[in-house]
């Protein structure tokens, strides 16, 4: 498999990220950071490394130039990425060599080493055996604060992703009809997502009682007139940035009680979006939506947090949930997606991706929020 650089590699952003990571590491008493393949590595360098049984890792020690350790067979592809322009040296290991001995040499003198949250356990255990004197900690407190505040360029990539998934939702009502299965619709959605996205990461088509299961996925259930359909979809763009949006549809004339409850949900989602501003806390945004639903008797049917961060991963920090007193800052991007779920009966959800700005909120998804009624 070929390794490649992210389409993000423009301007000076990547040149600033590793030095910041090293400076923050020193401030937090961490001597070195080791980052394996995945979104953290892609964020720091633009390097979209292939994850396999062979270790590949960025190694940054506070007082040394950064190095990427790669298998010899990956050397050519690695050197053709943007890494050399970022001052990252390439160190290789042969098939018959112990790469964790090479890693231990690169980490010589380090007492505390942070590894990224998705660093494979089998690599970490071998690193611990090769470096018994080293204390290993998570790099989450170092990397997550960097990633959760999006740059203007990252916001534009997220906006492009939102527009692409909005285009899919604009077509969904045409694919819904009694007599079709959830799977029938999901396959059409998948094809539409792939017209602009590199991958279709998830597709939820929950009809009737399945709409009351927030993470239902889709099944062979046949849809019928007189029931709701929750459609939650997203994918990854060529830039590496993700989309995620939910709308609720209804086959035929909506049940009056469902329409009443949906109007409350729409009010809750709009109020939570409007409350996004610098200085607000994540838990306060959750409370805005939750209080409106609770006052309408739907509190116990709101089963999940109000939102999650999004970027190079569909779910990342910050999380919009009770107990998270993190203060919102400009550049933070996350979903606002309250819902209600009456188990075995019906459910609904509305989800937009928004960005906190200096002046308030920038909603990236632009599809209407009203219940989408499908004539049938």
Image (cartoon, rainbow, N blue to C red):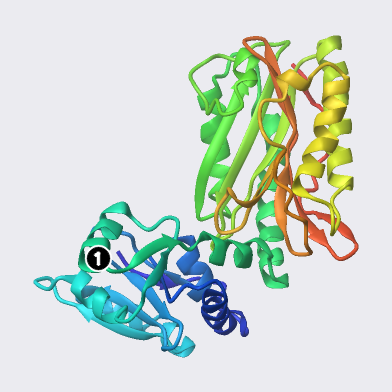
The residue located at (78%, 62%) in the rendering is 329
> Is 292 left or right of 20, judged from the image as shown?
right
The residue where tag 1 is placed is 132
The quadrant where residue 215 appears? top right
The x and y percentages for residue 177 are 65, 20
Where does the N terminus fall, quadrant-wise? bottom left
Q: Reply above or below: 334 against 351.
A: below
The residue located at (64%, 14%) in the rendering is 208
The quadrant where residue 80 appears? bottom left
> Is 100 left or right of 193, judged from the image as shown?
left
Total numbered labels: 1
- State whether residue 239 appears in this view: no
The x and y percentages for residue 371 are 81, 27
The quadrant where residue 290 appears? top right
- State whether residue 194 appears in this view: yes
The x and y percentages for residue 310 are 63, 53
Give whichever of 250, 109 is nearer the camera.
Answer: 109
The x and y percentages for residue 149 are 69, 65
For label 1, the crowd category at 10 Å Cα-Cα, with few meaning under 14, some 14 to 19 and many 20 or more, is: few
Secondary structure beneath label 1: loop
Give whichever of 254, 292 is nearer the camera.
Answer: 292
Q: Reply above or below: 165 against 181.
A: below
């Amino acid at each position: 498999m070929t390794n490649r650089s992210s389409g993000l590699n423009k301007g000076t952003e990547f040149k600033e990220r590793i030095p910041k990571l090293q400076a923050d590491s020193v401030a937090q008493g961490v001597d070195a950071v080791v980052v394996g393949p995945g979104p953290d590595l892609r964020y720091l360098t633009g390097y979209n490394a292939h994850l396999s049984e062979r270790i590949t890792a960025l190694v940054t020690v506070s007082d040394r130039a950064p190095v990427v350790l790669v298998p010899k067979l990956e050397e050519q592809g690695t050197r053709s990425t943007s890494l050399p322009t970022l001052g990252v040296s390439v160190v290789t290991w042969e098939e018959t060599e112990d790469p964790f001995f090479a890693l231990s040499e690169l980490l010589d003198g380090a007492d505390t080493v942070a590894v990224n949250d998705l660093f494979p356990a089998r690599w970490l255990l071998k690193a611990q055996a090769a470096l018994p004197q080293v204390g290993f900690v998570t790099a989450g407190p170092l990397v997550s604060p960097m990633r959760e505040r999006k740059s203007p360029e990252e916001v534009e990539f997220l906006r492009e992703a939102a527009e692409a998934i909005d285009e899919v939702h604009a077509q969904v009502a045409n694919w819904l009809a009694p007599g079709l299965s959830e799977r029938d619709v999901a396959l059409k959605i998948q094809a539409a997502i792939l017209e602009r996205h590199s991958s279709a990461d998830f597709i939820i088509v929950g009809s009737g009682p399945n709409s009351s299961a927030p993470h239902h996925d889709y099944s062979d259930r046949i849809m019928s007139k007189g029931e709701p359909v929750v459609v939650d979809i997203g994918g990854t763009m060529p830039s590496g940035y993700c989309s995620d949006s939910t709308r609720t549809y209804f086959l035929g004339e909506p049940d009056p009680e469902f329409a009443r409850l949906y109007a409350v949900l729409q009010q809750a989602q709009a109020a939570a979006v409007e409350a996004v501003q610098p200085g607000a806390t994540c838990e306060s945004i959750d409370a805005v939506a939750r209080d409106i639903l609770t006052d309408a008797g739907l509190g116990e049917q709101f089963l999940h947090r109000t939102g999650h961060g999004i970027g190079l991963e569909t779910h990342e920090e910050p999380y919009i949930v009770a107990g998270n007193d993190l203060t919102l800052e400009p550049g933070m991007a996350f979903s606002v997606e309250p819902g209600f779920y009456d188990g075995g009966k019906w459910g609904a959800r509305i989800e937009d991706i928004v960005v906190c700005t200096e002046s308030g909120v920038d909603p990236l998804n632009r599809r209407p929020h009203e219940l989408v009624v499908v004539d049938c």
